[in-house]
Amino acid sequence: MTSAPPKLYVKSYGCQMNVYDSQRMADLLGRDGYVETAGPDDADVIVLNTCHIREKAAEKVYSELGRLRVLKQAAAEAGRRVTVAVAGCVAQAEGEEILRRARVVDLVVGPQNYHRLPELVARTSNGARVVDTEFPAEDKFDHLPAPSAAATRARGFAAFVTVQEGCDKFCTFCVVPYTRGAEVSRPVAKIVEDATRLAEAGVREIRLIGQNVNAWHGAGPDGSTWTLARLLERLAEIPGIARLRYMTSHPRDMDEALIAAHGELPALMPQLHLPVQSGSDKILAAMNRRHRHDEYVSIIERLKAARPDIALSGDFIVGFPGETEQDFRDTLALVDAVGYASAYSFKYSPRPGTPAAEREDQVPEEEKAERLARLQARLEHHASAFNAGTVGRTVDVLLEGEGRLPGQLVGKSPYLQAVQVMAPTSSKGEIVPVRITATGSNSLFGTLVSASARPGGPAVDEPRVASAGF
Ligand code: 5AD
Ligand code: SF4
C-alpha cells in the first residue's frame, strides 16, 4: 500500500509577484510529491509568502503565525509533524528575527532562494531551524520548474510571467530595493519560452510582471538589449496569445516606444497601472520619484493620444512626511485630471531602514486617515464614472471561470474589469463580445452578443460612450 502524498498549503500576501512565486513554490514541491491543499488544517508543509511593503501587511503574518502555533501543537499531539516556512519579503527583511519572535517557524526563506526550497524543507525534518536569505549569484528562474500544462489550466487562461525582479529606484518610503534587491531582467529567450509553453497549455493572456516592469531591458537572441515594447511585439506573435498586459510600471521608464505600442499593438490591452504616489512636486521630490506632476500628466496625455480609451490605474500614498493640505490638494487635482479607472491608496507607513522613516515631520495618524477618506471618495467617483461609461458598449471578454450565479461565467474586459455573463461552461478560455448592461460593486454584468450580429468590427475599437478622463 502506498502512503498518502504529503500536503502543501501556500498562503500568499501582497503583490502579483508573490502570487506568481507561490505558484512556482507549489510546482517545485510538487516535483517532490507534494499536493496542494486548500487550507492549513491538513497540510504537512505550510508556507506563508509574505509582504513587507506596509507595517500592517507585515503584522498580518505574525497574527497568522499565532494561529498556526495552535494548529501545529494540535498536530504534534496527534503525532503529525507540520513544517512552517516564512517566505517573501518579511522573511528577507527580518531573517533570524522571525525565528526569535515566532517559535512555530521552522524555515525562513527569502525570495531569491525559492529554488532551494525542497532541500531547505528536508533540512528541517530533524527539528533544525533554517534561515536562507542570501542573494545568490545564480538566476533562480534557471532552477524553478516551468508550470505543468495541468497546473496552468487549473489556474486559468490569464497567466503571469515574471520578466524582471528587484528595483533600483529607491523611493524614500519603499522597502522593495532592500527586500528584492537590484533590478535584474530575464533574457528574451527565456520569457518567450515560458509564454510559448503557457500558450500551448491554453493560456490566452500573458501578464508580464516585475517590481519595476517597464525598466525591463533583457538580452535579445541577437545579443542586443531589447526594450519592453520590442518584447511585447515578440510575445504578440506567439500563436494563441491574444492579450498582453504588464505591471507595475514607473513613470520614468515609460519610453516613447512603449507609449506608441499602446496605439500600435492590438494584443496590448488598453489598460495600464502607472503609480504616481503624489501630485505635489515637493512630495514627489522628497519621495525621490524623479519626475514632476506635469511630467506625469504629459505621459498620460501621450498615452491617451496613442490609445484614447486606455484605462489607467495608480497607487497613492497620503501623509508622506511633510505633506501639507496644499500638497494633498495637488494630489486630488491630479486624480481629477487623469480620471483613473481604478486605484490603490494607502496611508504612509514608516518602514524601518528607509530614509523617509527617519524624518521628524511625520504626519499625525488622524490627518492621514482624513486625507485617505477624501482621496478614496474621489477615486471611487472616477472608477464609477469609468465603469458607467462602458454600459451600453460591446467589449471583448476573456471568459476565465465560473461566475457568481449558476450558468454564469466571469471574465475580464480589455480594461481589466470583471464581467459576469450567462455563457456555456464550454466557452471558458474564449474571447467573446459582450454587451455591458449594468455595473455592480465589484463587477459588470453583460450579455453575450453573437459575433455576426455585432456591427462595426472588434469591440475594443469602438469609441467610449463616456470618458472619465481629460
Ligand atoms: N507606506 C505606504 N504605502 C507604501 N507603498 C509602498 N511603500 C509604502 C509605504 N511605506 C505603496 C506604494 C506602492 C504600493 C505597492 O504600495 O503606493 O506603489
Ligand atoms: Fe518601491 Fe516602486 Fe519606488 Fe521601486 S519604484 S522603490 S518598487 S515604489
Image (cartoon, rainbow, N blue to C red):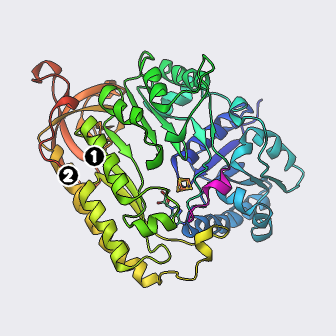
Query: Decide: marks 2, 1 in contact (CB < 8 A)?
Result: yes
Identity of the residue drawn at 32% across and 31% down: 398
Q: Is residue 387 visible?
A: yes
Q: Position of residue 337 (x, y in %)?
A: 24, 57
The residue tagged 1 is 301
Q: Which residue is mark 2?
A: 470
Q: Main secondary structure of the magenta part?
A: loop
Residue 179 in the magenta stretch? The answer is: yes
Residue 344: image tag: none
The total number of labels drawn is 2
Q: Tag 1 or tag 2, which sits nearer the N-term?
A: 1
Question: What range of the chain is rendered magenta?
Answer: 172-181
Residue 253 in percent (x, y) is at 48, 43
| 334 or 55: nearer the viewer | 334
Q: Is residue 275 above or below residue 420?
A: below
Decide: is 40 above or below 173. Answer: above
Drawn side of residue 74 relative to residue 411, left or right? right
